Structure formats: structure tokens, C-alpha cells
Image: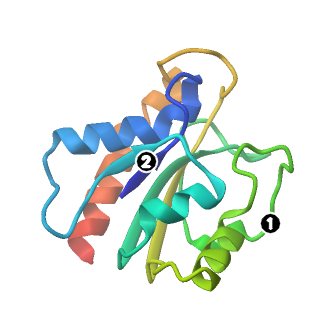
Amino acid sequence: MFGLGNPILSDDGIGIRIARELKKLRIENSELRIKEGSIGGLSILDEIDGYDRLILIDSIETSEGKPGEVYKLKAEDFNTVTHLSSSHGLDFLTTLKLGKKFGYKIPKIIDIYAVEIKDNITFNEECTEEVEASIPRVMQEIKDCLVQN
């Protein structure tokens, strides 16, 4: 499990916040690792290499979403770069394809939990109220996903 984001840019840190909350539950075992990081693009390959399954937690900003909405996505849902100036650089699907070509062992199962954000430009270690309220729901969805599989 990997929580992504920038913990000092308000809602952009939601992935890291959720990963930290899940760590407090002590659900890690020999098959589950909970990691966090402020990385993107090719850098993520080193973090996911060798795992059979990946649960990725991150923020998302869509044109019609409501802050705090939670989306469960697959890697294929990220097959185009929507912002060429993104700090992530490459879209996720391209990163995975390049990783395979470079010899990385890419997880066979990838579940992505993306939380719709309101603010990712304000320097703040706290999320907005709407996004903060989504944390228990996302955590429960992830716990349910772990039990089902």
C-alpha cells in the first residue's frame, strides 16, 4: 500500500494522511507494507517493484467532482496526461509500461483510491473540511478490499 502526495499542500497530502492513519491500526503483516512518499513519475517504480499487489492512495482533481468524493480506479484509467506541467511528469500507465521494459516486477493487481480535492496549492498541513471528512470512508473501503482479496 502506498500513500502519495505532498503533506504541506493541504488536500494534496490526503494519500499520505490515509497511509499514516492505516499504520496506526497496525494492520501490517508479512504480506502487507504501508509506505508513503512525495514522489511521482519513474520514481514510483522503485517503491512498487517486486510486489504482487498495490493499493495506491492519492488525490485527484476532476472537472465535475465534489471534494471528498472517493474513486476506486485501475491503472488503465490513467492512460493520458491531463496536465503536462504535472509534477508527476509521466502518466501512471506509461510509467508502468516503461517499468516492465526496464525489468521491474510490476504488481499484477493495482487498486487506486483517489480522493477528489478542493485545494492543493495552499501551504497547510491540514486538509480542507470536505476532504478530511472522507478519511474514515476511504480507510473502511481499503480495509474491506483487503478482507475480500
Give the residue displayed 61% in from the left and 51% down from the top. 40
Q: What element carries label 2?
A: strand
Q: Could you say where residue 35 lies in the image, as x and y percent from the top left? A: 35, 50
Residue 147 placement, left or right of 16: left
Q: Is residue 138 visible?
A: yes
Q: Is mark 1 on a helix, strand or loop?
A: loop
Give the residue displayed 37% in from the left and 41% down from the top. 18
Between disc 2 and disc 1, whose residue precedes?
2
Mark number displayed over residue 44: none
Residue 93 placement, left or right of 73: right
Disc 1 residue type (three-letter)? Thr
Residue 96 placement, left or right of 7: right
Tell me the CA gap for discs 2 and 1.
Answer: 21 Å
Mark number displayed over residue 3: 2
**Marks 2 and 1: CB-CB under 8 Å?**
no
Q: Which of 112 and 133 is in front in this view?
A: 112
Q: Which of 16 and 99 is in front in this view?
A: 99
Which residue has dot 1 on it?
80
Q: Nearer the viewer, residue 104 or 81?
A: 104
User: Please, is residue 25 above or below residue 110 in the view?
Assistant: above
Q: Rate crowding at label 2 as few (under 14), some (14 to 19) or many (20 or more) other CA atoms within 10 Å.
A: many
User: Please, is residue 138 above or below residue 135 in the view?
Assistant: below
Quarter of the figure with residue 12: top right
Which part of the image, by quadrant, shows the N terminus? Answer: bottom left
User: Please, is residue 20 above or below residue 144 in the view?
Assistant: above
Q: Which of 59 and 68 is in front in this view?
A: 59
Q: Could you say where residue 53 lies in the image, as x and y percent from the top left? A: 37, 74
Which part of the image, by quadrant, shows the C terminus? Answer: bottom left
Disc 2 residue type (three-letter)? Gly
Q: Could you say where residue 140 lies in the image, as x and y percent from the top left? A: 29, 51
